[in-house]
Image (cartoon, rainbow, N blue to C red):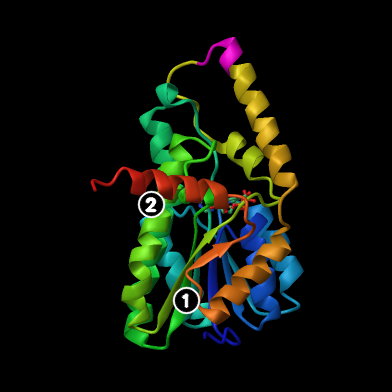
Amino acid sequence: MTDVQGRTAFITGGGNGIGLGIARSFARAGAKLALADVDAAGLARAKAELQSITAVETYQLDVRDRDAYAATAEAAERALGPVSLLFNNAGVAAGAPASKLSYELWDWVIGINLYGVINGVQTFLPKMVERNEGGHIVNTASGAGLVATTSGVLYATSKFGVVGMSEAMNPELAALGIGVSVLCPGPVQTDIVQRSADAAPKAGAPLSEEQQRRYREATAQAARYLQQGASIDAVGEMVLKAVRENHLYIHTDPSVGDMIKARTKAILDALPS
Ligand SMILES: NC(=O)c1ccc[n+]([C@@H]2O[C@H](COP(=O)([O-])OP(=O)(O)OC[C@H]3O[C@@H](n4cnc5c(N)ncnc54)[C@H](O)[C@@H]3O)[C@@H](O)[C@H]2O)c1
């Protein structure tokens, strides 16, 4: 069990969406907040909202930039004390049909969704271990990190990586008193679809009129689907409970259950007898 009161939480993607939901829950539970995001306006809004509850510092940071990450970590620890709660949460959800992908798109999604998590761990974990004061790391994956959903090749590749990394880290870090959770949300009411579409590099090969129309339609449908999901505040509370109780998997709803069963069965059925 991790008591979060008085600890410093570093939350990437903390300016909006799930990161903001986590920030709210941990602020109410007495943690100090270092929020990092590329979105300066989102960070300013989050700070204005939360600074009456707890100490809040914000940092404009692209999680792909390792030097900037190291400098941000130093600044955050100088301002708020040692970071012992780490939320590798920043992410984007965009892609293209497999035949239309480019290295630029691969690098963008893997760079943020997977290397962003790796960079967070590389930056903070050695210090957490050296200090020997326990702590907890939450990596945000997705239901699409447990089963290949309709969210596309790029997104699934990045999120499967985050799940595998978290599962491997969990027992190793447990021995050092550091918990590891992987957040695998179903739909959550955020603007990730539009935010990602606005920021994404263009697909490699040009899309035909028809492909563009279908892409716009799929994007609008995905955005509508998320609005039927959990609220960011509900997800923040689930994450707080999981950290306190040291759970590896954090699901926000049961929607991927049948797909996980089907995938597991297909894998087991393929084993030689
Ligand atoms: N919303 C959902 O339904 C859902 C479902 C499953 C998983 N997720 C995952 O949850 C996480 C948070 O997503 P969200 O839905 O809250 O989206 P969001 O767009 O509301 O928030 C993501 C935040 O990350 C920031 N960000 C993007 N690129 C960044 C970068 N390079 N460096 C630093 N910050 C960056 C954005 O500015 C934004 O503030 C993501 O990893 C996402 O893949 C979301």
Disc 1 residue type? Answer: His
31 or 233: nearer the viewer = 233
Residue at x-position 56% and y-position 37%? 199
Residue 127 falls in image quadrant: bottom left
Is 25 on the left-hand or right-hand side of 185?
Answer: right
Q: Horizontal and vertical percent for residue 256? A: 57, 50
Is 82 on the left-hand or right-hand side of 167?
Answer: right
Residue at x-position 56% and y-position 48%? 258
Is 98 on the left-hand or right-hand side of 209?
Answer: left
- Asked if one can make out residue 91 in the rendered structure from this viewpoint, the answer is no
Residue at x-position 38% and y-position 51%? 161
255 or 56: nearer the viewer = 255
Q: Is residue 257 above or below residue 83?
A: above
Q: Horizontal and vertical percent for residue 118? A: 37, 59
Is 46 on the left-hand or right-hand side of 114?
Answer: right
Q: Horizontal and vertical percent for residue 90? A: 53, 55
Q: Is residue 265 above or below residue 169?
A: above
Give the residues in magenta. Answer: 207-211
Residue at x-position 55% and y-position 80%? 245
Q: Which residue is mark 1?
A: 136
Whichever of labels 1 and 2 marks the residue nearer the N terminus, that label is 1
Residue 161 — which label? 2
